[in-house]
Every structure is written in C-alpha cells, then in structure tokens.
Amino acid sequence: MRQLQALTLLIFSATVPCAAGVLTFEEAEKAMLAANPQAVAASLDLDAARLRVTAARAGLYPSFSADASYNRSGSRGLPAGDSYGYDLSGSQPLFSPSVPAAVRAAKASMRAAEAAYDRAASGLRYQLKSVFADILNSRETIKLSGETLKRRAENLELLRLKYQAGRENKAALLETEAALKTAQWQHEKYRKNLRLLERRLNRLLARPAQSPAPELSLPQPPEPPEDFQGFSQRLEKHYALRSARAALAAAGASVDSARSGLLPSASASGRYAWSGSDWPASANSWSLGASLSLPLFSGGRLSAGLSGARLALRSSEAELKNASDEVYLNAEDAFLSWREARSYLDVAKSSLDAAEARGWLVRKQYLAGQASYFEWRNVEEQLISEQNQYLAAGRGLITSHAAFTQALGE
C-alpha cells in the first residue's frame, strides 16, 4: 500500500514547486514545442503562410523598377564611342478583382496553417501527457513488483518449511516456486517497458534516445463537472472548425478569383528614360498611360471555372457543417469517458481496500492452520491484481482527461 500512496502523491497531487532535477509537464511542453520535429515543421509552415500573405498583399501597391545599360563600340580606323541607357518605370493596378481575391486566399491559407499548427501541438501535448502518466505508472508498478517479489520469496520459504515438516504437499511448494519465477519475469518485463517509455519521452522532447529520464511531475486532473454544455464556447475555437472555416474562406476567394476573369481590369503605368552617348546631357523621354483589358471569348473556360468554384464553395459549406457535428460529438464522448474514468478510480480503490483486508485475514488464517493453501494463493493473486488495477485506473484518469482536452482542440 506504501507504493500506491506514493503514486497518489505523484500523480494525483496538486501542482507544487518542484525540487531541482524534477521535470514538470509545463517545462516539458515548452521544450517539446520548441524542438520536436513535428512542431518545428508546423511552425515553419505557418511562417511560410504568413510570408505568402505579405507577398499577395504587395499586389495592391505600386511597383517600380530601374534599368541601366552601357555599351562601348567602334570600328576600324575610328575612335570608340560610348552609349548609355537609363530607365525608371512604375505601375499601379487601378481595378483588378483578382488581386484582392488572392489576398483573401492567402489569409485563408494562413488561418489553415495556424489550425494545422494547433492540431500538431494538441496531438503532441496528448502524447506527452500520456507518456508522463505511463512512466509514472510504470515506475510505481516496478516498486510494487519489487514488493511482490519479496513477498513471493517469503511465501516460498514458508512453504518449504511447511513441506519439510510434512504439513504441506509438494504441489503447493512447486506452485509457489513457479509464482516466484513468474514474478521475476514480470519484474524484468516492467523494467523493459519503462525503458521503452523513457525512450519515447526522449523522442518527443527531441533528446538523445539514450538519455536517462528525470523525475517527472504531473498536475492533478480536475474533477469533471456534471454538464458538458459549459464547454460549447471553447469548441468554437477548435482547430478542426478553424481549418474548415479557412477552407470555406479559400473557396469563397476562389469564386471571386474565377469571377474576376469575366470582369475588366485596368492599370496605370509611367516611364522615364535617358539614352545617348553622354550623360546627363543626353536625350530623354517619358510616358504616362493607362490600360484596360476586357475578356471577350475564352471558349467557355472562364464560365466553367466559375461554376466549378461555386460548387467547391458549396462543398466547403457542407464540410464545415460536418466538422462542427464531429467536433461536438467527439468532445462529448471524451467528456463522458473522463467522468467514467473518475468513477472507476473510486471503484478500484474500494476493491483494493477490500482485497488488502481479505489478504491480511487469510494469511493469518493460513499461518494458524485455519485456511488451505489454495485459498491463500487465490487471495494473494487477487490482491496483486487489485493493486495493479488501481495503478491502471490512476493512469486511465490522466489519459482520459488528456483525451478530453485534445477533443476540445487544446
């Protein structure tokens, strides 16, 4: 029971300042989001999307360019001559519906990239909290397994004395010996599983796989409320809904872009140039103008593109409705699982208390000759099973709360 109380203090205690060398979940989360390859890739995609917005917005502003040229030429018997050319030009779109549509599409792509980053971060947070819970559970399981090994060895010594005294049969002795060997095998299995979990934690944190895992600290899961409706507003910020809204905005921008192909476009331009064999006393020229373009015939390409964009817009609207339903249902399912896990922890605790009391009583009865070996063996096995079940229930509560947080898009 001492190990179970330690697990309760480790996993189900409130967040307190941690001693040196203890890695808190908040510290691990920051390190993971800064170094994990998935998080880094999503962050870089988001930065690239922001730059595409800047590039698309530049189409709304005037553009300028400058050119310069120099040539030296001559012929046999004549001195060589120089020629220069300088050119400064600029343009400004006056009416171009495709440019604002491109800006809206780029902004929608940026919002989709933000949602993708939040999706990746949410998934990584769930994995991190799960591996925290698994490592804490595995470490306490190893401690419990060590106590079980000690008890199994004591039981074998007791059975050996009883067998030598003629008060127990050989089958009971052999079964007790086999139980000890099984406990030794399980202990090694638990140690292997712990090492695999520590490697998984190192990979999430982008640390070398062989690095030893530090002591971990995990905050206490809160008590689940009675009603799920209080989380409805938080679901509106879910990354899946934001991604679907961004896809809808991109589809609307595509409709505007396709429609702009049927509309006229206008722009203004200007140019000033110098050219000649000497500068600045050289010939110069300038020009100012405006242009207007109107599509007349495209073989149905523009109208077909517009119709296709409108159909894609209707599809995006349906996808948004479907995403909204899925997000709500998944979050409610995760909420109910969280409440179930919390209730099951109480059940596991009650069963463990009963198994401990029963195990203590039957052991005393067996030592006094009032209970058979088989009854004592069955009670021992039930006690070990209930101890492990209680540890699993604690881990299940943490992971179910983590799954609910992920279902909220956080």
Image: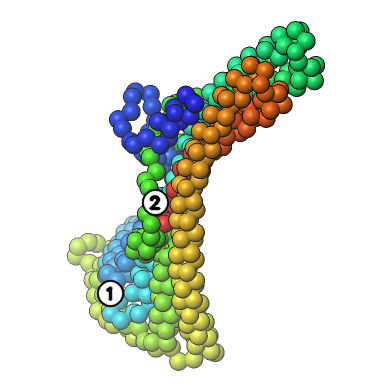
- Tell me which corner region of the image, top left, top right, bottom left or bottom right, holds residue 72: bottom left
Does residue 134 show up? no
Residue name at image x 75 percent, y 13 percent: 167
Residue in the picture at 49% in, 26% down: 1
Left or right of 117: which side holds 353?
A: right
Residue 173 lies, with reference to residue 70, above or below; the image says: above
Dot 2 falls on a residue whose secondary structure is loop
Q: Is residue 105 above or below residue 227?
A: below
Determine whether, in the image, residue 226 is placed left or right of residue 137: left
Q: Earlier in the sequence, mark 2 or mark 1?
A: 1
Nearest the camera: 145 or 409?
145
* Residue type, numbered disc 1: Gln
Residue 35 position within the rendered picture, expressed as x and y whole percent measured from the top left: 43, 39
Q: Closest to the observer: 35 or 164?
A: 164
Can residue 398 be seen here? The reply is yes
Looking at the rendered image, the disc whose residue lies closer to the viewer, 2 or 1, is 2
Residue for badge 2: 224
Label 1: which residue? 92
Residue 51 on image: x %, y %: 36, 58
Q: Residue 335: where, in percent of width, then height?
A: 45, 56
Q: Residue furthest front?
A: 370
Residue shown at 22% from the left, 61% from the top: 279
